[in-house]
Image: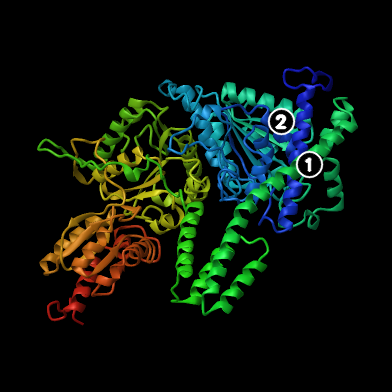
């Protein structure tokens, strides 16, 4: 511990440093107090704050250097303020959900308070220089959800240090000198993803410092219900590095002990930055002066003795006592700092509120005037004036209230036509458009780097194009990709030494090195996290989930973090990760899944590609790698040994996203499908031809996006009948495709027969060939379903297949 009498004049601290730190601690506490008041007073919907953690966060900020990363959670306001990422006015703007990036640059009003982010992407879609930023990955509310990506952020530093080919990426790294600071509450360390990440960090030996803010509770549940031995540092002691081998370094320090905190973080940062050793900093004896959040009072579940202990051990109180004891300031001087902190917090809060209300009040007044103008010329004036009166009575009206009133008035006046009504309709459409920009944009890339803008290039074949197994096509593609783009890395279970379980990477680790093609442990959540973090730092990772069924292990990280990243930062951050997996038909309950419906519901924000073979897969990969969006690629599991003709321009051709391909033209009925089902449907179509039924078969190729040019409806206009076929459960991906075509493309107008879906049975597929046949759609099912549709339309032409 730093000696008190050695602090003044130290290279670490000066008297001015100490006083500035106390000032910041006071300011941060005051904005927390005001924030709670604002929520209770109706100005904000919810509040959660970092009160009680101020001093520890200040100590951490002292070793946070430009180029480093924070991957924390919603109590890190003091860190963000200390490194200059956050003003208190911005803090309050986020509380008020001010949907204006000039006032709330973290998320544009999309996230609740305490969710901080650094904007890495400029208005043109280009990366900013991360080495000049105090990088902060946008926080997520799901407990421990920030931890998996932390592994990847730190692993990127390892790659930047150890792979000399990446040393030219000077706007992303200074040869791997960057440390990742991850923060988490003590209760959230009970989550499995935390334990998985700490184990992975110890294995990988990466510069990750995980700070556990330990205030003894997870909302109302005390630590003895949360953690073995009541201490996460004791519980993780087996990971401590020692003479027996590598591991993690562990520090434990009290959260109210300012000099000890400063020294601890100096030591932690030094060992992690220089040696790439992961570190756990267990910050104990912290408090929550206002309880967990604005949802309730901690007096409901804490004893009087505990509350008294927290008042005595409040980090700001102890910091104040330490300053006085060591003569760094007088009581009067500290009281003046405290008074100024209150004034500054109040000023910043008022400025944020005024800026927020200024926008809304101007829109409110405009809305009232327009409604009054309509009322003056309407035969429904009384009803319209009642709507106006109700709107005027609304406490702190927001855009929802205004637009809802406009829509209600337009319903009341019905078909009345006059200039005021027409102006109100135009006003509504303009506001819907503006608010779409505020709240509904940036789910996918809107930059010049969008994969949707990649120019299509067709595969080229010649007489000399060889016929090979599908696995050889994809292996040759990956070889070309790794040769061309040094940013590309791949990792996953069994992907390295043996070249993956289906030989898609066979021999490539030997050629390109373990630093680029890397085996991992069985840890799907942090495999995805590793990929997310690397992609955030300018690399182009392809990470593998060995079988599609295993993706559920990582679903929380995929949906909470990756899929929403661009959206929740209003385009300020991105992570163009490609997740590679293989799915559809194998055999067995845990190896034959096709959970597309789950993916489609959970992964909006990712592209989902479902190629039928590896020629198509290579072209889709090439399109995705040229774009800046994340994606899920589901390779067809039973096609690795199916024969294909290898294109001559492998690594160059690009298959566009969202553009179906007609595999077989026909006039009687359209079947829409994808992936491994294409082969089965084509076989059925061939047999149906022998029965006089001409089927058109369409491979959608990607499910997200889906048929962006409305090609499928053109087919249905010709055939007037449609089947949507896949291997997912009933109502899942087949239902999604039906909605996209019948509702979105309005194909129902051209149907002469009821639309039909063909899907798997409701249960998982049992093991064995018989289990597959009787559980998943087969050629016979498709033949008979098509035949029955045609028989219903023309019973004389198509007699019953099976007479009783």
**Which of pointers 1 and 2 indicates the residue nearer the eye?**
1
**Could you say which is closer to the camera, residue 739 or residue 286?**
739
Category of crowding for the residue at label 2, using alpha-carbon neighbours closer than 10 angstroms: few (below 14), some (14–19), many (at least 20): many
Category of crowding for the residue at label 1, using alpha-carbon neighbours closer than 10 angstroms: few (below 14), some (14–19), many (at least 20): some
Q: In this view, does 704 lie to the left or right of 404?
A: left
The quadrant holding residue 399 is bottom right
Tell me the SS state at disc 1: helix
x and y percentages locating residue 510 in the rendered image: 34, 26
Q: Mark 1 points at which residue?
A: 343
Residue at (28% x, 74% y) in the render: 754
Residue at (27% x, 36% y) in the render: 477
Query: On screen, 29 above or below 366?
Result: above
Residue at (36% x, 55% y) in the render: 592
Q: Is residue 21 left or right of residue 250?
A: right
Contact between marks 1 and 2 (CB within 8 A): the answer is no
Residue 235 appears in the picture as rendered: no
x and y percentages locating residue 555 in the rendered image: 48, 50
Query: On screen, 351 above or below 744?
Result: above
The count of marks equals 2
x and y percentages locating residue 620 in the rendered image: 30, 44
Q: Mark 2 points at which residue?
A: 59
Quarter of the rendering occupied by the C terminus: bottom left
x and y percentages locating residue 639 in the rendered image: 26, 48
The quadrant holding residue 764 is bottom left
**Could you say which is closer to the camera, residue 753 or residue 226?**
753
The quadrant holding residue 627 is top left
Q: How far apart are marks 1 and 2 (CA)?
A: 24 Å
Query: On screen, 323 above or below 713?
Result: above
Residue 382 appears in the picture as rendered: yes
């Amino acid at each position: 511990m730093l000696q008190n009498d050695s602090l003044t004049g130290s290279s670490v601290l000066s008297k001015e440093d100490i006083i500035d730190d106390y000032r910041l601690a006071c300011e941060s506490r005051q904005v927390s107090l005001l924030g709670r008041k604002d929520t209770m007073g109706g100005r904000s919907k919810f509040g959660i704050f970092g009160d009680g953690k101020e001093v520890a966060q200040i100590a951490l900020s002292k070793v946070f250097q430009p180029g480093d990363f924070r991957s924390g959670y919603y109590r890190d306001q003091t860190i963000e303020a200390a490194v200059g990422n956050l003003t208190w006015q911005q803090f309050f703007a986020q509380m008020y959900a001010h949907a204006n990036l000039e006032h709330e640059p973290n998320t544009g009003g999309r996230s609740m308070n305490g969710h901080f982010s650094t904007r890495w992407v400029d208005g043109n879609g280009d990366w900013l220089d991360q080495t000049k930023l105090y990088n902060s990955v946008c926080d997520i509310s799901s407990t421990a959800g920030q931890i998996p990506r932390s592994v990847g952020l730190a692993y990127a530093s390892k790659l930047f240090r150890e792979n000399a080919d990446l040393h030219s990426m000077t706007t992303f790294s200074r040869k791997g000198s960057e440390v990742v600071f991850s923060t988490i509450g003590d209760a959230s360390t009970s989550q499995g993803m935390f334990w998985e990440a700490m184990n992975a960090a110890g294995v990988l030996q990466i510069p990750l410092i995980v700070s556990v803010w330990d205030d003894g509770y997870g909302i109302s549940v005390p630590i003895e219900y949360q953690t073995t031995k009541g201490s996460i540092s004791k519980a993780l002691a087996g990971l401590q590095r020692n003479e027996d081998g590598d591991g993690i370094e562990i520090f434990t320090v009290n959260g109210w002990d300012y000099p000890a905190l400063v020294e601890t973080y100096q030591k932690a940062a030094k060992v992690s930055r220089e040696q790439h050793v992961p570190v756990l900093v267990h910050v104990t004896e912290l408090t929550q002066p206002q309880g967990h959040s604005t949802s309730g009072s901690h007096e409901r579940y804490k004893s009087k003795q505990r509350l008294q202990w927290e008042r005595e051990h409040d980090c700001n109180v102890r910091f104040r006592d330490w300053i006085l004891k060591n003569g760094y300031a007088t009581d009067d001087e500290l009281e003046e700092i405290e008074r100024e902190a209150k004034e500054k917090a109040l000023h910043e809060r008022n400025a944020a509120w005024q800026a927020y209300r200024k926008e809304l009040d101007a829109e409110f007044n405009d809305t009232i005037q327009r409604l009054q103008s309509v009322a003056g010329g309407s035969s429904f004036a009384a009803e319209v004036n009642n709507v106006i009166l109700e709107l005027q009575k609304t406490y702190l009206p927001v855009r929802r209230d205004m637009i809802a009133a406009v829509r209600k008035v337009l319903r009341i006046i019905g078909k009345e036509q006059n200039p005021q009504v027409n102006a109100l309709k135009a006003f509504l459409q303009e506001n819907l458009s503006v608010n779409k920009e505020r709240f509904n944009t940036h789910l996918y890339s809107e930059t010049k780097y969008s994969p949707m803008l990649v120019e299509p290039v067709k595969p080229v074949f010649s007489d000399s194009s060889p016929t090979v197994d599908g696995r050889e096509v994809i292996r040759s593609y990956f070889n070309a990709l790794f040769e061309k783009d040094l940013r590309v890395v791949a990792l996953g279970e069994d992907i390295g030494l043996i070249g993956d379980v289906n030989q898609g990477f066979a021999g490539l680790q030997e050629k390109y090195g373990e630093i680029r093609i890397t085996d991992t442990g069985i840890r799907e959540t942090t495999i995805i996290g590793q990929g997310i973090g690397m992609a955030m730092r300018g690399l182009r990772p392809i990470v593998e989930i060995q079988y599609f069924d295993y993706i559920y292990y990582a679903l929380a990280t995929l949906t909470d973090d990756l899929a929403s990243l661009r959206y929740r930062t209003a385009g300020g951050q991105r992570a163009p990760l490609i997740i590679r997996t293989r799915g559809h038909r194998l055999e067995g309950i845990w190896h034959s899944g096709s959970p597309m419906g789950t993916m489609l519901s959970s992964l909006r924000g990712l592209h989902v590609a479902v190629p039928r073979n590896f020629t198509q897969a290579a072209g889709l990969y090439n399109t995705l790698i040229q774009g800046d969006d994340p994606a899920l690629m589901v390779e067809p599991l039973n096609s690795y040994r199916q024969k294909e003709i290898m294109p001559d321009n492998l690594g160059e051709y690009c298959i566009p996203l969202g553009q179906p391909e007609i595999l077989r033209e026909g006039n009687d009925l359209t079947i829409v499908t994808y992936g491994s089902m294409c082969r089965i449907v084509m076989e059925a179509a061939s047999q149906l031809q022998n029965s006089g039924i001409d089927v058109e078969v369409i491979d959608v190729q990607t499910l997200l996006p889906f048929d962006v040019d409305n090609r499928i409806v053109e087919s249905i206009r010709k055939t007037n009948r449609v089947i949507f076929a896949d291997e997912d459960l009933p109502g899942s991906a087949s239902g999604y495709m039906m909605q996209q075509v019948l509702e979105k493309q309005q194909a129902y107008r051209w149907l002469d027969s009821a639309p039909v879906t063909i899907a798997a049975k409701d249960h998982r597929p049992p093991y064995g060939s018989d289990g597959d046949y009787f559980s998943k759609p087969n050629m016979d099912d498709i033949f008979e379903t098509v035949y029955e549709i045609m028989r219903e339309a023309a019973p004389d032409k198509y007699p019953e297949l099976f007479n009783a």
